[in-house]
Amino acid sequence: PAYISFMPANSFTALRYWQLGEDDPGAADGVTGNATTMARFKDGATSPGNSLTRQGSPSYTAVDGSYGSVLAMSFKGSTDGYISDLLDGAPDNFGVEARVKSNGVSGPQVVAYHGTMAFNGFGILIDDAGHPGSLTYRVVYGGVTNVDTGVAVTPGTWQDVALVRDQGATKLFVDAALVYNSSIAAPNFALDEPLGIGQDPQAASNFYSGALDDVRFFFFNAGTFSAQDLA
């Protein structure tokens, strides 16, 4: 199954993983995304209780299978997203990872975010603020910081992007290569907060334009993270 290549054996202590297509009954290229998209745990079991709820009308889109997936989710950038029920976060030793294929549209856009963006939590955004027409990845810790990493988004191309907070260091990886490393302050702990893919989880805003695939949200034991754990 496609999920195996994206979920290597390691010391993750909690994990949610959304394939955004392969686990959803009836999913096919061009079809509107299911009302809920299924989650998986580390052992590969599906988990209806941790599924994401559709907002707007994102649709499944075919991919070429080059990274072990055959379907992704396409978002229009105006009304589309998926949000979860309540999850707990952590101030350190966590990560969020997604495959990103941007349409290159200007403006702030959520790839994946857990928490309330004004107050707590963490996530990955893209934006062209300060350099119109040139999107870069941003690290957002709600109520703490919104940092332009300077790392370019490549529209029309799949990029595996991961934000990892590892023993006090905030790191961004693109295609498993470390491209940003900072000692910025830790995020505010997000307790019982939703997670959003393609939009702000708490508001109908910051919609993403493009395709997303294989989104996972994880914790790990201190000192155990390796870039080899990424896809």
Image: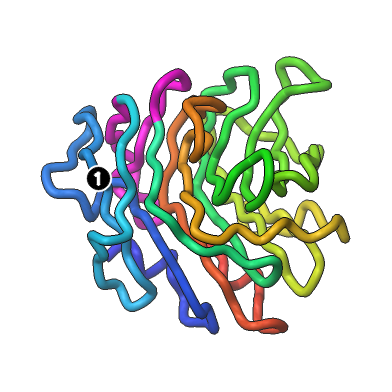
In the image, taking residue 136 as reference, residue 175 lies left or right, namely left
Q: Position of residue 131 (x, y in %)?
A: 81, 20
Q: Quadrant of the N terminus?
A: bottom left
Query: Is 227 positioned to the left or the right of 201 in the image?
Result: right
Q: Nearer the viewer, residue 147 or 190?
A: 190
Question: Label 1 belongs to which residue?
Answer: 36
Answer with the quarter of the image where residue 124 lies. Answer: top right
| Coordinates of residue 193 in the picture (x, y in percent) | 51, 53
Q: Secondary structure at mark 1?
A: strand
Residue at 70% x, 69% y is 92
Total residue callouts: 1
- Please report the residue visible at 40 percent of the width from the left and 34 percent of the height from the top: 81
Residue 65 location, x and y as percent?
Answer: 34, 49
Check the image and tell me how it is coloured: rainbow
Q: Magenta part of the protein: which range?
A: 57-80
Does 76 appear in magenta?
yes
The question of residue 10 being in magenta is answered with no
Quick check: 106 above or below 123?
above
Q: Is residue 74 above or below residue 6?
A: above
Check disc 1: other Cα within 10 Å, few if <14, some if 14-19, many if 20+. some
- Up/down of 133 relative to 210, above or below: above
Give the side of residue 41 with respect to residue 49, left or right: right
Amino acid on which the number 1 mark rests in the picture: Thr
**Which quadrant of the structure image shows residue 128?**
top right
Image position, residue 93 (x, y; %): 67, 72
Q: Residue at x 51, y 80 (%)?
A: 13
Tell me which residue sits at (79%, 44%) in the image. Answer: 145
Residue furthest out toward the left = 26
